[in-house]
Image (tube, helix red, strand yellow):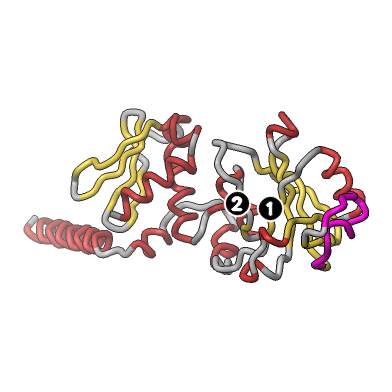
């Protein structure tokens, strides 16, 4: 009997030690460690590790009218005023076509993109496919072929369209504001924010979903996404609001969490 009690005591002490070590580990985590534990879709981690966030070599091209889209598709090119492209934006390796709600209605969004094979600086009047008697300098970007995105990028929130983004975001974004994400940290926090709100609304889990970022905790309770710092709730937003305006909510919550 005494031997059995001793064994139970050893097991309890060992388990207690493991729990304490795990708690110490969680408390000591850096933001980077917390990011590594975020839940991302299968296959994304490897791609995310290779992204150069300083490289924004995908031009998101807007259109003046529906005819311009037809001409660009037929002749495999896109053109943009040189004044809108800085030296730091070159070279441009891809072009994605943004179809605005004003021009395309239900067909709005980003559906097409292509690899740039040639970038030429010329006068606007020299772009023969879309005649205009102007001496303004333009970049003509010849495209190898126009491809369809596997998942079109939807127009949301009326946010300003990012003029430049990267290929990773182009291929893995669901809404136009997503293209403005500027770092791996932002990507992970933004994804977790949308996941928390979406999970909460769909009631996929009976436990309280949460995500740790530095010294703050992002969680969901009673229909609201909350930012908690030092045991105090410093910001709340309804899950419905986050789902409707994810990038806007992300900006506010990120600032709150970085204070």
Residue density around tag 1, few if under 14, some if 14–19, many if 20 or more, within 10 Å: many
Residue 133 on image: x %, y %? 87, 52
* Secondary-structure class at tag 2: loop
* Secondary-structure class at tag 1: strand
Q: Which residue is drawn at 62% across and 58% down?
A: 165
Q: In this view, does 69 lie above or below 183?
A: above
Instruction: Work out whether residue 207 can be spotted.
Output: no
Instruction: Work out whether residue 15 can be spotted.
Output: yes
Q: Which residue is drawn at 18% across and 63% down?
A: 17
The residue tagged 1 is: 60
Task: Specify whether residue 125 is painted magenta.
Answer: yes
Is residue 111 found left or right of 22 in the rendered image?
right
**Marks 2 and 1: CB-CB under 8 Å?**
yes
Residue 167 on image: x %, y %? 66, 60
Q: Is residue 258 above or below residue 49?
A: above
Q: Which mark is residue 162?
A: 2
Q: Does label 2 or label 1 sit earlier along the sequence?
A: 1
Q: Give the range drawn in magenta.
A: 120-134
Choose top left, top right, bottom left or bottom right for residue 47. bottom right
């Amino acid at each position: 009997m005494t031997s059995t009690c001793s064994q139970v005591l050893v097991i309890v002490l060992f388990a207690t030690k493991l729990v304490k070590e795990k708690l110490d580990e969680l408390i000591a985590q850096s933001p980077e460690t917390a990011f590594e534990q975020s839940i991302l879709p299968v296959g994304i981690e490897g791609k995310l590790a290779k992204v150069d966030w300083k490289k924004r070599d995908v031009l998101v091209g807007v259109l003046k009218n529906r005819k311009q889209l037809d001409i660009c598709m037929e002749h495999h090119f896109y053109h943009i005023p040189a004044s809108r492209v800085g030296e730091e934006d070159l070279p441009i390796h891809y072009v994605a076509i943004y179809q605005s709600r004003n021009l395309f209605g239900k067909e709005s969004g980003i559906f097409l993109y292509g690899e740039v094979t040639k970038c030429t600086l010329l006068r606007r009047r020299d772009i023969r496919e879309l005649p205009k008697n102007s001496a303004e300098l333009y970049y003509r970007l010849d495209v190898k072929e126009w491809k369809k995105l596997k998942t079109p990028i939807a127009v949301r929130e009326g946010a300003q369209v990012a003029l430049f983004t990267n290929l990773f975001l182009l291929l893995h974004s669901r809404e136009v504001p997503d293209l403005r994400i500027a770092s791996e940290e932002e990507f992970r926090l933004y994804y977790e924010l949308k996941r928390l709100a979406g999970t909460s609304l769909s009631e996929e889990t009976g436990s309280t979903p949460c995500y740790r970022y530095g010294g703050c905790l992002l969680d969901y309770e009673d229909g609201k996404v909350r930012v908690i710092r030092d045991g105090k709730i410093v910001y709340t937003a309804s899950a419905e609001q986050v789902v409707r305006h994810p990038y806007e909510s992300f900006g506010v919550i990120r600032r709150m969490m970085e204070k």
